[in-house]
Amino acid sequence: MLILVIGQGAREHAITHTLLQDSKVEVVCAPGNPGIANIAQVDSVDIADAASVVALAKKRQPDLVVIGPEAPLVAGVADELRNAGFVVFGPSKAAAALEGSKAFAKEIMQAAGVPTADSKYCQTVTEARTALELFGAPYVVKDDGLAAGKGVVVTDEFDAAVAHAMACIDSRDGGAVVIEEFLDGPEVSLFGVSDGTTIVPLTPAQDFKRVGNNDEGPNTGGMGAYSPLPWAPKNFVADVTKNVLQPMVDEMNCRGIPFQGLLFAGLAVTSRGVRVIEFNARFGDPETQVVLARLNSSLSELLLAAATGKLSSLPELEWKSESAVTVVMAAEGYPDFPKTGATISGIAEAEKLGLTVFHAGTKSNESGEILVNGGRVLSVTATGSDLSDARHQIYSGIERIEFDGEHHRSDIALKAALGEIRLGEHS
Ligand code: AMP
Ligand code: GLY
């Protein structure tokens, strides 16, 4: 089976790596990155341009196309591929609005009875001020458009909240913000694979959004992740599937916008129960790296079953009992002003120690060196018998990898490994 994977990050590297565990599968990734090029064929393409992606699919004739990032989904690339007769894992443009528009996601959640934070949609700064006063501190202000996880400000400062609202509203025509109630409690990322009717949950993970240890500094796309969550409430996955994932899929179906692809629920386990923070319409990065590290079943069979409406006949997924931890190595200045160009050394040495090194923002030069080419540079993953063991593996091996200005968090999965996460407290 030939699978075309669209994207170029550590998530697509992890997806390609996992698909290739199945000896029947061949992968072409476009545009890919130097790490992916070591394990699969790569092809260049402008992923947000549907015509180029369709032209590539016509050339390669894949049995399945898997779309990684949100930008091509929101641009309607899945629709154009399906119109051209290809089998695609990834939602239509209309269904991807669950990620592309926070206001649309709220509307569907409300109709489906899915628990989430109370919120107000504001198109003027005056409306935003009123909503901020209504909800009180801590203030949560979200850009309504796509912002790669970086359009959200959570602050105790009223003036900073107003300033972010103003910046989002003024940033473009029709700019708007969603202001909402603050949710306490630890966060969980739970992915569901949907064929439009049936949704199959994957194993939950926790992401670390802030750039620094102890959740200090600005929000990022994610600095690390781990799975499983030893502290998760009993029956967590079954409950969230029943109360969140399946109702969303049913509501989208009722509206004639079936959601076929990866539904990513960002959840807060609050003192009042589980609440949805947001939905994404794609695999999360870096959560995918740890979730797929624990998958025992065939990823290609799962994604193909979803893309062809056959999830209800797929055997139950199997998970490894091992724990997985991934740590993102970031460029100097990330997330505000990442500096590119530094030479990376030590990847092969880390791999010899058993780590899996997924490339995110890298490029190679003529002499075959790997250089920093983005904010999140590498996503380094290890498994172990439990979280402490996986942490030991990752942090002893990651030291081998070096580049100027490199920084990473040293506390990924630490609280969970120490048993220090308590439900109903923000972490
Ligand atoms: P989002 O882009 O909606 O995932 O938000 C990014 C991050 O902001 C989340 O992962 C949370 O850490 C934080 N956040 C978003 N909404 C809330 C909320 N209502 N209460 C507390 N934290 C939030
Ligand atoms: N790690 C969060 C995301 O992929 O949006």
Image: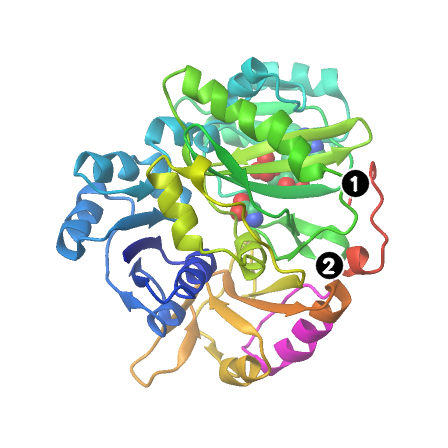
Q: Which residue is mark 1?
A: 426
- Front residue of 277 and 361: 277
Per the rendered image, the range of residues in magenta is: 392-411
Q: Quadrant of residue 197?
A: top left
What is the quadrant of residue 276 in the picture?
top right
In this view, the residue in front, 64 or 334, is 64
Which residue is located at x 64 percent, y 66 percent? 408
Q: Which residue is mark 2?
A: 413
Looking at the rendered structure, the kind of residue marked 2 is Ala
- Which residue is painted at 26% across and 42% down in the image? 87
x and y percentages locating residue 323 in the rendered image:
68, 62
Q: Nearer the viewer, residue 356 or 322?
A: 322
Instruction: Tell whether label 2 touches label 1 (CB within 8 Å).
Output: no
Look at the image and say whether residue 367 sits in the magenta stretch. no
Q: Which mark is residue 204?
A: none
Label 1: which secondary element: loop
Q: Is residue 44 left or right of residue 377?
A: left
Among the two numbered marks 1 and 2 on one chain, the one whose residue lies closer to the N terminus: 2
Instruction: Confirm whether the magenta stretch covers residue 402.
Output: yes
Identified by mark 1, the residue type is His
Residue at point 58% right, 71% down? 406
Query: Does 56 sit above or below residue 326?
Result: above
